[in-house]
Image (cartoon, grey):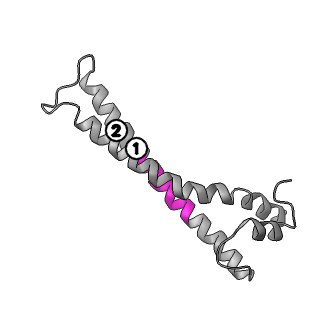
Amino acid sequence: MDWKQEAIDKLKGYEAQRQSMEDIPRELERLGAAYTNIRAARIDGMPKAGCSPSGREDAMLSNIVHQDELKRRLKEIRLWVEIVDGGVVCSGRGGTADAGVLLHLQGQRLHQ
């Protein structure tokens, strides 16, 4: 296995992973609001006209599962970014990886 190439390939996704750390919490907030709207469709708990009770339950379960998946993904991303940032610190390049550091670490081959 070519560890240098493996590191280069992993670092190509660094910026996208960092952006995901900002996007996922916003999506979780949106899903939380959507879940509240599902639960508050009718005060008496009856489904809206044309909707079955199981449709409401399915929407609620789908929302919960999606939130759980996003929370797991966010945890994985934070760990991954922490590891990459730790590698950058160990290389003596600073606290977090930026485009210049990534270019240097990858031997000027970030976008090849």
Task: Using the rendered view, name the quadrant where residue 50 is placed.
Answer: top left
Q: Residue at x 61, y 64 (%)?
A: 80
Compared with residue 75, is residue 34 higher up or lower down, i.e. above or below?
above
Q: Residue at x 28, y 32 (%)?
A: 57
Cα distance between the residues tagged 1 and 2: 6 Å
- Specify whether residue 72 is in view: yes
The type of residue carrying mark 2 is Leu
- Specify whether residue 1 is in view: no
**x, y percent for residue 73:** 52, 54
Name the residue tied to disc 1: 65
Q: Which mark is residue 39?
A: none
- Marks 1 and 2 in Cβ contact (< 8 Å): yes
Q: Mark 1 Cα within 10 Å, few/some/many (few <14, many 20+)?
A: few
**x, y percent for residue 30:** 40, 45
Q: Residue at x 60, y 60 (%)?
A: 18
Q: Main secondary structure of the magenta part?
A: helix
Q: Mark 2 Cα within 10 Å, few/some/many (few <14, many 20+)?
A: few
Is residue 103 located in the magenta-colored stretch of the structure?
A: no
Secondary structure category for the residue under label 1:
helix
Name the residue tied to disc 2: 61
Task: Using the rendered view, name the quadrant where residue 13 is placed.
Answer: bottom right
**x, y percent for residue 99:** 74, 65
Compared with residue 20, is residue 62 higher up or lower down, i.e. above or below?
above
Task: Using the rendered view, name the quadrant where residue 87 is placed.
Answer: bottom right
104 to the left or right of 44: right
Compared with residue 107, is residue 95 higher up or lower down, i.e. above or below?
below
Compared with residue 58, is residue 96 higher up or lower down, i.e. above or below?
below
Is residue 69 located in the magenta-colored stretch of the structure?
A: yes
The type of residue carrying mark 1 is Val
Q: Which residues are magenta?
A: 67-78
